[in-house]
Amino acid sequence: MKEKKGHQADRRKFLVGMGVAGAAATLAGPALAASAISCNVRWDHEHELVIIGSGFAGLAAAIQAKRLGAKNVVIYEKMPVFGGNSAYNGGLFAIPNTPLQKQEGVKDSPEIMAADQAKAGRGVADKELLLHVAKNAGDALQMTLDAGAEYFPYLQQLGGHSVPRTYQTTVACGAGITQPLIKECKKLGVRLVNRAKFDSLIFDDKGKVIGAKILEGHYFGRGKEGNPVNVRSERGVLVATGGFARNIGLRSAQDPTLTAEVPSTNPPNATGEAMLELFDVGAVPVHMAYIQTGPWASPDEDGFGYVSNYSIYNFAHSLSIYIKTGRRFMNEIADRKTRSDAQLACRDDDGKPLPPITITSYKHAKEHPTMKKVLKYGVGWKFDSLEEIAKQYNIPLKPLKEQVKEYNGYVKSGVDEQFGKPMEKAKGKFIEGPFVVIRNWPKVHYCQGGAKIDVQARVIDSTTWKPIPGLYAAGEVTGGMHGVSRLGSCSIPDCMVMGMTAAKTMMNA
Ligand SMILES: Cc1cc2nc3c(=O)[nH]c(=O)nc-3n(C[C@H](O)[C@H](O)[C@H](O)COP(=O)(O)OP(=O)(O)OC[C@H]3O[C@@H](n4cnc5c(N)ncnc54)[C@H](O)[C@@H]3O)c2cc1C
């Protein structure tokens, strides 16, 4: 075995010669707590290519591997259902240079998209990765279309994007992509195994990842870890296990403001233990403290709910109002960090949160399917006049009326003199009654941090700064691509392109 410096080498040496079965008996607990060396491993299953996690990254990788001729591809998923965070997602997908942009007369390029993202990343984003993703996002879109995904026939301009470039699934949800991809995986013969939790990696005596320990029959959140099996993978292991927004200990250790009291849009399985295993075997942790909050979320419902997608669509032609002053306090389509920070500063005289309201003309709000649900489920409200709104939320009426008048002037001139909001998507959309009002308050949404990868999706070793042989990662489990703040609709291209890239690298290795 080629020895590594540091604790990991010691841990691995400890396991050499014992074999996994012997080590399992020695270590406490139902699961093996450490990655292992392969000597004497009894393999329970053997595959050509092993993928952990069934979100965008894992599914795209599996399809790409199959297209490149892989015979035996398996996805292990710890939950009973496949799709991960990706299935809950808003279905918003940024792609530069698309036929829809040409149709709408929008000039764009991968370089412009990557530059928008780098700007939101505040100087520490990985520009090489961003450009790689932007250049290949069209292929990822095509993969979803080939699988049967459907998108609205118009583009949206999300916060921080300099032009409209965002598609959205017609179900306004990531399941509009994951379901067709899962179907495609099945059609291509990919094995999808649920209730199978990845525990640790298995190395050969040269330090190459050749398999994984999986806990079969895992019951998430019910105290049943599952039975350990050793899974061999001829082409290495791809870890595509998503972020850690629901691991409160880990996230608040990075950012002490993100305690259990701050809600999250993520489902409970976003716990990040597979990422910790990557760090344990030497992967470089990057940007772990950059944890994004979503400025479109609502304090009136749990999780992503209905308001998030509603706000994402409507912010471009709405105005957000600070209740205390009756005035706008931000560019409604600035990047997420800028808006979240501005919202979190909206406080009452005692410093308690005072969620701002967002006002949209009913006739424009109703263009998006989420408005009906927002009203139906009582997380948004219809008002006939500004007087009613001011009364309901205790907003000073005069400044509110002046603000709306002023804003309508910007709609007319196409220039937001207050906050520099791009007004392209607000063209002709004056703020006029009747109105729809929602409240916004940020929720923990996305982890920019994770394991460092290179542009071929290889996991980088913190002692050698070279790829760890046989180990790949893609999607939200990786870190560094987006820097301080990821732009909306840019995770789908990231996950899918890097999943596809990982598959290519693994098939060529
Ligand atoms: C509510 C919501 C809305 C969003 N909307 C958008 C949007 O519209 N556009 C956009 O670009 N981004 C959006 N995002 C972000 C984006 O959805 C995620 O970043 C993306 O889905 C992550 O994909 P992934 O493949 O990396 O991981 P995931 O989709 O999270 O999949 C990872 C899978 O790995 C499994 N897993 C984890 N640990 C283990 C383990 N130890 N063993 C086995 N399996 C494991 C998980 O259960 C999960 O199924 C949204 C996120 C949320 C939460």
Image: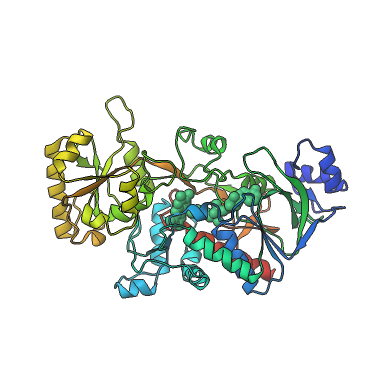
Residue 261 shown left or right of residue 208 in the figure: left
x and y, in percent, of residue 100 in the image:
35, 72
**Quarter holding residue 222:** top right
Q: Where's residue 320, x and y in %? A: 25, 45
Q: Position of residue 277 (x, y in %)?
A: 67, 46
* Quadrant for the C terminus in the image: bottom right
Residue sitting nearer the eye, 339 or 184: 184
Residue sitting nearer the eye, 41 or 334: 41
- Residue at the far top: name it: 350
Residue occupying image coordinates x 51% and y 55%: 86
The residue lying furthest to the front in this view is 376
On the image, which quarter does residue 193 sit in? Answer: bottom right
Residue 454 found in image quarter: bottom right
Q: Position of residue 80 (x, y in %)?
A: 62, 50
Residue 416 visible? The answer is yes
Q: How many discs mark residues in the rendered view? A: 0
Q: Is residue 478 visible?
A: no
Residue 222 position (above or below residue 483): above
